[in-house]
């Protein structure tokens, strides 16, 4: 019961913190980390210790899974080259740079464990990247690259951490064993992910009950990661592969009711877990400081060096990775060089998160031969990197984006493309309607023709600018008032005992669905 109370308290603080962030116009990940830092020193507040398995098996899989579900596979595939350059190349580059810098500052510490620390702090966080990039309205391709990077880079870092930790404790046997470790982790993760996609895709296809569909969706990331870990494969790779595959085929795997309910379900899960993750990161400060007996000067110097290295390494990598590859004519023709502001904003969007802390807590206690190393300092360095990048880079990223005046997506072109597709969809709908017209009353056919026409017109209206109210906007405004009036009549009838509760629920459900559609259209 005490553990349940702790969870409720943490969720309540996370929800209140997120609500306050929205009220103040702040990014909730940053505010929640700061709140956690403050609460970690409040006497009597919860002493919550973050366990690596809780993060890597309990929290990270569902967050990665929902991020993969929401990722466009065509866009991911189109940007695969820059994504892999960041998720694999930059992670390795950063890990090596940090490893050698720390080894130079602490020459008595073996290089292998210094490289393990580099693997810990190298990957930007999936949650932070998604939360911040979408919140500040970066161009679609930049968001896709950042999200794609954050989906894959954890796997690179965790595999590298496994290899370097094995070398540090003396269990690595050479290049051959390291190669097998990497192959099993990545290849096994892909295989398990594909298997999960096939199995759960089949189950979704055979299910029509929205509740069962949602239950299967919740089980998927945990089942996939546990199966992958049982084979010593990468659970992160497996979850991402399964999520990308299932998300791409979701329109043909689930009914409309299942998709609507699943979307609402995962939005809630994502909201709660993201808030909980950043709050938990901040709450670890007291424990991280406990047992830290390294001289203060060394702590400050090492912290500044590691933080400076990861920030500088990202900039050093970004520009050559962006422009040198375009010296190849084939690459340049297919993907012209972007504006220099694009790699600049991507380079500054390097916020670390809970995976870094969980990986730091998973560092070995002792090294080969039973020797020790300043493990508490390494955990502190990981924690400091998380807080510094979230608070400094995360807080300044919106301002940086505004000052760079990064060219945004062309809203007119987007609306034009959508309108053209909507017109083709409307034409297909009308053709099918004419085929079925003989089997329906004329009044129904006329009503359906008008519906198709209105949907097509509403798409074209977005091209007309926002200087005056369009017919669709007027429809939404008036229809909203009508819905409110209908609700009041049903509620009064229920209160007076003229209809049962079930009738009210059915009416409200239909009206709520219509209102949610009106609101979604008004926000587009």
Image (cartoon, rainbow, N blue to C red):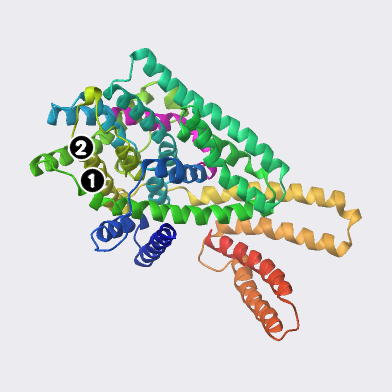
Rendered location of residue 455, percent (x, y): 68, 58
Is 114 placed left or right of 61 in the picture? left
Question: Residue at horizontal 27%, vertical 46%?
Answer: 389
Q: What residue is pinned by disc 2? A: 306
Is 265 placed left or right of 368 in the picture? right
Q: Residues within 10 Å of mark 1 (few under 14, many from 20)?
A: many
Along the viewing direction, whichever of 21 and 463 lies nearer the viewer: 21
Along the viewing direction, whichever of 89 and 289 lies nearer the viewer: 289
Q: Are marks 1 and 2 in contact (CB under 8 Å)?
A: yes
Q: Magenta includes 80?
A: yes
Q: What residue is pinned by disc 1? A: 384
User: Spatial distance from mark 1 to mark 2, Cα to Cα?
Assistant: 9 Å
Rendered location of residue 420, percent (x, y): 63, 47
The quarter holding residue 264 reads bottom right
Q: Is residue 461 above or below residue 107?
A: below
Query: Would you say residue 276 is visible in this rendering?
Result: yes
Is 398 placed left or right of 200 in the picture? left
Instruction: Mark 1 or mark 2: name the one nearer the start of the chain.
Output: 2
Rendered location of residue 315, percent (x, y): 26, 35
Tell me the magenta residue range: 68-93
The quarter holding residue 512 reads bottom right
Rendered location of residue 139, percent (x, y): 42, 46
């Amino acid at each position: 019961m005490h553990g349940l109370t702790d969870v409720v308290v943490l969720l309540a603080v996370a929800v209140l913190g997120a609500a306050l962030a929205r009220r103040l116009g702040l990014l909730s990940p940053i505010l929640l980390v700061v709140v956690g830092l403050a609460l970690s020193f409040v006497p009597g507040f919860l002493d919550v210790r973050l366990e690596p398995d809780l993060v890597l098996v309990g929290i990270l899989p569902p967050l990665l899974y929902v991020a993969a579900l929401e990722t466009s596979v065509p866009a991911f595939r189109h940007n695969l080259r820059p994504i892999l350059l960041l998720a694999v190349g930059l992670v390795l580059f950063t890990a090596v740079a940090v490893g050698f810098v720390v080894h130079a500052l602490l020459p008595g510490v073996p290089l292998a464990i210094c490289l393990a620390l580099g693997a810990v702090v190298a990957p930007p966080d999936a949650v932070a990247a998604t939360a911040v990039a979408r919140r500040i309205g970066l161009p679609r391709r930049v968001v896709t690259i950042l999200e794609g990077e954050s989906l894959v880079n954890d796997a690179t870092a965790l595999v590298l951490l496994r290899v370097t930790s094995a070398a540090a404790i003396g269990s690595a046997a050479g290049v051959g064993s390291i190669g097998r470790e990497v192959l099993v982790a990545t290849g096994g993760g892909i295989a398990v992910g594909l298997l999960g996609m096939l199995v759960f895709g089949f189950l979704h296809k055979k299910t029509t009950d929205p509740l069962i569909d949602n239950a299967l969706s919740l089980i998927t990331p945990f089942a996939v990661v546990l199966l992958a870990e049982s084979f010593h494969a990468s659970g992160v790779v497996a979850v991402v592969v399964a999520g990308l595959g299932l998300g791409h085929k979701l329109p043909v795997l689930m009914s409309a009711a299942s998709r609507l309910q699943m979307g609402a379900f995962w939005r809630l899960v994502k909201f709660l877990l993201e808030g909980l993750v950043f709050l938990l990161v901040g709450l670890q400060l007291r424990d991280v400081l406990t047992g830290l007996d390294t001289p203060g000067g060394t702590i400050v110097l090492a912290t500044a060096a590691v933080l400076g290295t990861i920030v500088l390494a990202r900039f050093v990598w970004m520009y050559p990775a962006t422009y040198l590859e375009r010296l190849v004519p084939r690459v340049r023709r297919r993907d012209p060089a972007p504006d220099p502001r694009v790699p600049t904003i991507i380079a500054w969007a390097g916020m670390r998160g809970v995976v870094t802390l969980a990986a730091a807590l998973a560092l070995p206690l002792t090294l080969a031969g039973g020797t020790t190393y300043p493990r508490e300092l390494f955990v502190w360095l990981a924690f400091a990197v998380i807080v510094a990048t979230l608070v400094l880079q995360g807080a300044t990223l919106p301002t940086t984006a505004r000052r760079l005046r990064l060219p945004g997506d062309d809203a007119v072109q987007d609306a034009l493309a959508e309108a053209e597709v909507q017109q083709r969809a409307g034409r297909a709908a009308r053709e099918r309607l004419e085929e079925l017209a003989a089997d329906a009353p004329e009044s129904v056919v006329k009503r359906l023709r008008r519906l198709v026409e209105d949907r097509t017109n509403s798409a074209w209206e977005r091209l007309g600018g926002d200087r005056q109210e369009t017919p669709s906007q007027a429809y939404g405004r008036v229809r909203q008032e009508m819905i409110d009036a209908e609700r009041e009549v049903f509620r009064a009838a229920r209160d007076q005992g003229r209809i049962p509760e079930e009738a009210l629920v059915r009416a409200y459900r239909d009206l709520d669905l219509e209102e949610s559609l009106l609101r979604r259209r008004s926000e587009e």
